[in-house]
Structure formats: structure tokens, C-alpha cells
Amino acid sequence: MHKILFVGRLTFFLPVLFAAIMASCGAAPQTSTQEAVTSAAKNRPNVVIMFADDLGYGDLGSFGHPYIRTPNIDELASNGQRWTDFYVAAPVCSPSRAALLTGRLPVRSGLYGNVIRVYFPDEPGGLPASETTLAEALQAQGYATAMFGKWHLGDAPHALPTRHGFDEWVGVPYSNDMNWVGEPDFDALVRMTMTGETEQRTVSLARRAAKYAAPSAADFATPLFFSKATADGFEDQVEESTDQTQLTQRATQAAVEFIGRHADKPFFLYLPYSMPHTPLFRSEAFAGSSLAGRYGDVVEEIDASVGTVRKALADAGVLDNTLIVFTSDNGPWLFMREEGGVSGLLRNGKGTTFEGGVRVPTVFSWPGTIGADVISDMGSALDLFTTVMTLVGGDANTATDGLDLSPRLLGRAPSPRQEMPYYRGGTLYAYRKGPWKLHFITEGAYGLPPQRQEHATPQLFHLLRDPMEQYDVAAQNPDVVADLQAAVLAHQADLTIAPPLFDVRLAALMPPPKR
Ligand code: MG
């Protein structure tokens, strides 16, 4: 297993890098949708967005997992809306998070990479000040804003959450596997790749693979930030090498305290859990609690957190005035085998533009406002900015790619989202319109098949009849193929692809030219 893990870790980012360098409501309210929106805006609902990391489409009880028990999320799902066709805008962490917070496609904002797929430690760039986050937009509406959990949009001071609309933040700046104790750092690994001096890199990656398979807190020196916006600036404290077994509990406690302090003022609480991203850590109380092993333990601890936060909202008397969204940032990291999750009946996982990479288990809850239903209209994390700002009566003009899902949440009107582009880095791999999905390029997750293939004749799948994307029906449906190709042209006509910000860092890592 370690050997296989090792090969895959290599493929996580380095070969791509190397190649690139070498190449140079169900129950609708009684009022109309517009009246419901107006009424909701009057109440200035609180907004809680819970965002799990690498949680697969099949990893919740309410989405079909037979062994992982998630009664709290399932209760939100059964009393609210469970969305079956909800997408993130990218199959990996950083661009997916950027899209949720800005309502803009990563290729439009530049928050993506073609070589470096996510942000790594000591990133000189990070989320640009020119982007407007949902937190900033809600702050402008008088909301208190807090974030407890993983950021992953840059670890430089100017890029931190408190500089982008959050009054307070407790959490990790990037993925919990990115500070490698006793191993070369990211810059060093990139330089080794560039110079072709790969022996040390190979040895290091093999050691790291073993550390993923048997996670020990001592091997991953993840910093925990305590950051606040103050009247005259910012206060940042860092707990180096935080105990990762406490990450979920500490985010939960911070959320409970924040809710207790803001019962009389509208608030936005963003809870991007650091888990179940590998290496998997859970507190003592959940060790061995699940039938489904360490991954199950970690998901069940997140579920307990959801229950604790919900109880805090009820105790504060604000549950009925709070929109809760639970979703995930991308599909399961299948390469991690038993340490990763599952995408259920969907094909493949994290990193890919198959459904398993980008379709995520999603629940909307707002007791008394959103009725119990299962929604199979399309929605996207891209739409949360626009939807939330519509519900609070604010401005969503900057969220260029977002649509307002409130008609579907509050009334009987369908979701306005009829189409979804699937990007891997800056390349459009596939496009969905209605039930149809057209693949121009297919490629498996890091280190896993299928190999990258560009299709001279695009592959067409009917996702409702064939959710596993097994049966190419392009030949039988030339009119559908033509219709989707026209939709792609319209999408591209409205889009200027920005240069990839994550790759800017590469230039500084290039070895000096030889004389
Ligand atoms: Mg992720």
C-alpha cells in the first residue's frame, strides 16, 4: 500500500509540474417567491455555511452510506432540502473555496493553477484584494462575520480571512498535510523537480506516504491561527504544530461561543472543516466510534459538530432565523484508499471532472422557511453568494457567475441553474446542460486511471439515466451534442480566462539560467 501511495503522491503535483517546465422547498410558503424573499430580508437571517473537506458524495447516511452514521446532517436533510445535483466549481480545494466565497469561476478570477493546483505554504500571493468575498458583502450589510476552519486561499498576512471580510478566524491556513515535519518543503520539492535531482524527493515522498497511512500528530506541523480584525488593524496569533485531533472540536467550540455572543445581531458563520482531508485525525471520543474505520470516525465527529452548532442556534433562539448550508469542497481523495471517502454511485473523485470530483452532498435547512424536499435541480457553490445576498436584501453584482437559488429554496420555481461548466485547472473538460453532459477531455484522479484522453468526438452521457457516466450516447443524439456545443460557445463568449494566479510562484522557483 505504501508503495502505491508513494507513486500517487508523486503524481499529485510534481510530474505535471515537471512536464510543464520541460515544455518550456418542497413545502412552499403561502406567499409568492418574491414576497417570501422580501419577508426573509426583513428578518435578516443568519447564514451558516458548513464546508467539509474532501467529503465524498457517498459519505453521509442521507446520501446512501450504509455504515457512516450522520444523524445530525440527516436530520437537516430530512427537515430541509437535500440537493442531489449540487456542484462545486473546481475538483480541488483552493479554486473551489475561491468560487464559493466570490461567486466567480476560478478561470475568471484567476484563482486556479495549471501546474500548481492549490495554494501551498509560504505562498507570496493569495486571494487578491480586488475580489469581493461573501463575508465582505455581508459585513457591508451590518453582519458579524466569523470563520472557524480551513482557509486555503493564501497564508501571507494580506491574504488571511480577516483581511477579506471576516471579523474573526480560528483555523488552519492550508491543508492539514502541507507542513511536513522532517521533510523538504514545497519550494525544495519543486526545485528538485526542476533540476532533475529527484533522489531525495523520491525518498521523502515514500516516507510521507507512510505518514498518511498511519497519521501521527507529530508528523504534520499544521499551524492554528487566531486572527481578529481590530479598530486599528489586525491581531494574529499562531499556535505552531497544533494538535490535529482537536481541530474539529476547537472549530465547533469557537462556533458555539460566536453564536452565543451574536444572538441579537445578524451573523455569517463560515465553518470550513479541516476534515476529512487526509491525514485523518479525530478526538479521543470518536476514535473507533464508527463501523467505517478512521474515515468514518472523522465524518461522525463532523456530524456531531453539526448537531452541536444546531443546538447552539436553538439555545440562542435563532434557529428559525438561520439558513444552514452543509456541503463539501470537492470529491473524495480516492488515492488515499481506505483513508479517503467514497463518491457513492458517481464516477471517480477529487481532482477529476467526472461527477465524483465535483458533485457534492448538499443540504439546505431553514426551519419554518425551507420545507422538506429532495431537489434534483442543479445548483452550485458558485450560487451561494448570490442566493445569500438576495435573501438578506443585499448586492450580489460582483458574483459574476452566481445564480439566485432562492426561488427553489423558498417557493415552487425551479432552480435557474440549467448549465454547469467543468474545469480542471484552466481547461474546460466537460459541460452539462439539463440532464446531458458532454465530455471533451476525460482524465482520472491523481495517480489513478483513466489516463488523460482528448475526445475528437465528445462523449455524451445522460446523467439521470446513467449517473455513473458509463454509456456514451453521442452517436445516437447528434442534435443534443450540437446543442451542448452551442451552449459551450455561448459560455466561452461571456468569459475571459484570467492567467493562473497559483502558477505565478513558479517563476521565483526557477533555477537561475546557466551561463
Ligand atoms: Mg478539498
Image (tube, rainbow, N blue to C red):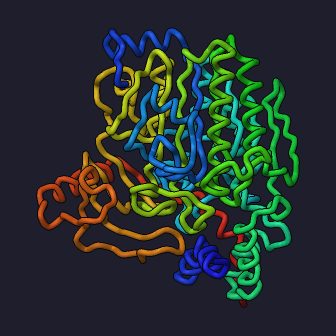
Foreground of the two, 509 or 168: 168
**Does residue 353 appear left or right of residue 317 in this picture?**
left
Q: Is residue 487 above or below residue 165?
A: below
**Is 375 displayed left or right of 329 in the figure?**
left
Q: Position of residue 204 (x, y in %)?
A: 76, 78
Q: 76 and 94: which one is in front?
A: 76
- For residue 401, which quarter of the picture? top left
Screen quadrant of the N terminus: bottom right
Residue 377 at x, y = what percent? 32, 38
Locate ligand 1 by image quadrant: bottom right
Q: Which residue is located at x 46 percent, y 25 percent? A: 79
Does residue 90 show up?
A: yes
The foreground one among 242 and 268 is 242
Residue shown at 36% from the left, 13% from the top = 29
Image: 199 above or below 444: below
Question: Is any atom of residue 106 visible in this view?
Answer: no
Q: x, y percentage for residue 462?
A: 24, 55
Residue 86 coordinates in the image, percent (x, y):
41, 43
Instruction: Give the quadrant of the C terminus.
Output: bottom right
